Image (cartoon, helix red, strand yellow):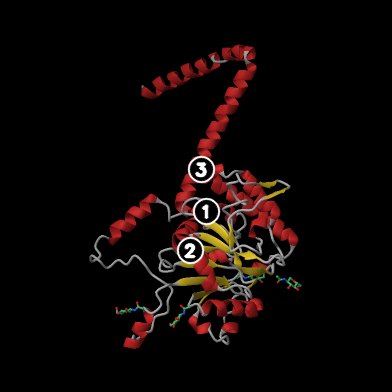
Amino acid sequence: MRTIKSWRWMVRKRHMLIDGGTCEVKMKQLPFMGLVCIVMLFIVYRITNYQHLQTEIDEKLNPFYASKDIAVASNSLGNLPRGIIQARSDLELKPLWSTSSSRSKVNVSSSHNLLAIPAGIKQKSNVDAIVQKFLSENFTIILFHYDGNVDGWWDVEWSKKAIHIVAENQTKWWFAKRFLHPAVVSIYDYIFLWDEDLGVENFHPGRYLEIVESEGLEISQPALDPNSTGIHHRITIRLRTNKLHRRVWEVRGSTKCSDDSEEPPCTGFVEGMAPVFSRSAWLCAWHLIQNDLVHGWGMDMKLGYCAQGDRTEKVGVVDSEYIVHQGIQTLGGVSAPKRLQILKAQTRNILWMYELRYGKMRHLSSKYLNSAGSEQ
Ligand SMILES: *[C@@H]1O[C@H](CO)[C@@H](O)[C@H](O)[C@H]1NC(C)=O
Ligand SMILES: *[C@@H]1O[C@H](CO)[C@@H](O)[C@H](O)[C@H]1NC(C)=O
Ligand SMILES: *[C@@H]1O[C@H](CO)[C@@H](O)[C@H](O)[C@H]1NC(C)=O
Ligand SMILES: *[C@@H]1O[C@H](CO)[C@@H](O)[C@H](O)[C@H]1NC(C)=O
């Protein structure tokens, strides 16, 4: 009975659909409106569908941010004895058996700073020169060996004091995301995430830190000697007479920097080759580095978000301690210009995706992405 009934219902429905054909006559009166309607419905359907899929994929790919996982984490900690959870960790090497002398050594230096640097064996002498400078200021050193060659380093005198991490063909952003988790590096006042092709003859880490601290810079970089190769933004060039600067005045091409400019690369900007982060700026910047971000292109345009306040005040370029950028293409054999072009395009696409995903970034418009892509 029921099947017959429903069959009849279907027949009736089909009639109705056929009757709907009269609609066609009306549509001829308003063909344009009808077409627009259909197209809009289709677009809305596709967008909804796509967003739903994207959310699903994100939740699977990004356990960091899935709220379910966070709830699980706090549940699973609930049974730990009170007071056992430590908020901080570090990258210091610990003696297996601590004697009273080694214990007292540990608390001698009250300030902790970290230098993290990619290290290819071809850049050994330059990395050595950089590390020597930082070691004399008691920095903790972490080397990212992207060429798989660690053995080549054991003959440098400081090698055993450094931490060595090996992963082939990865960039410093990849390493930093995986091994410089904010909780792990939280004892460090400042984190230097530098490239290996920097000349440090005129750079002193201690004096640099004094300036950065006294000026309240949360994100900074040493200025680039005008001799440097691969200068992409004028704001990074050293001004001979300054101690530091926070903005640049320039009218050239699409870049128009004046007193009123509030955005990178006129102000609030450092470049990705030698950034220095305060603890809280790093906590923020670490989150800015996406898991699938390979090259840092375009990242520097976003660092202002992590200035911990007004980026025109808390981001700056230190002139009195400066470096030379040698512009050596090192990571992953990315030397052929064509491959560079492809990578740039990819990076821009990825950044666009982030822009869409995190709506609040949207106000930093395509202008910056384009300039990041075209000038580098
Ligand atoms: C190191 O720790 C000891 C014992 O807690 C303390 O007396 C001393 O002042 C500390 N030294 C420094 C430099 O903080
Ligand atoms: C580095 O640490 C040593 C002792 O571990 C100390 O004597 C020296 O003053 C420190 N240097 C700086 C620049 O803090
Ligand atoms: C790393 O890159 C080099 C050169 O491009 C290549 O020969 C090597 O196989 C790569 N290694 C890995 C693990 O992908
Ligand atoms: C720039 O390079 C030239 C030639 O290489 C050199 O003579 C000069 O001293 C350099 N200037 C600075 C400020 O290092």
Residue 36 spot, x, y in % from top left: 61, 23
Q: Nearer the viewer, mark 3 or mark 2?
A: 2
Quarter holding the C terminus is bottom right
Helix, strand or loop under label 1: helix
Instruction: Please state which of residues 341 and 159 is positioned toward the viewer in this rendering.
Output: 159
For marks 1 and 2, the one nearer the N-term is 2
Instruction: Please state which of residues 308 and 56 is positioned toward the viewer in this rendering.
Output: 308
- Residue 91, relative to residue 348: is it above or below? below
Residue 75, quarter of picture: bottom left
The residue positioned 49% from the left and 54% from the top of the image is 306
Q: Nearer the viewer, mark 1 or mark 3?
A: 1
Residue 228 spot, x, y in % from top left: 70, 66
On screen, residue 334 versus residue 280, left or right, reads right
Residue matched to label 3:
359
Tally of marks: 3
Q: How far apart are the alpha carbons under marks 3 and 2?
A: 35 Å
Q: Which mark is residue 313?
A: 1
Residue 64 spot, x, y in % from top left: 43, 56
Q: How far apart are the alpha carbons under marks 1 and 3?
A: 25 Å
Helix, strand or loop under label 3: helix
Residue matched to label 2:
214
The answer to whether the residues at label 1 and label 2 have Cβ atoms under 8 Å apart is no
Instruction: Please state which of residues 202 and 38 is positioned toward the viewer in this rendering.
Output: 202
Q: Which mark is residue 264?
A: none
Helix, strand or loop under label 2: helix
For marks 1 and 3, the one nearer the N-term is 1
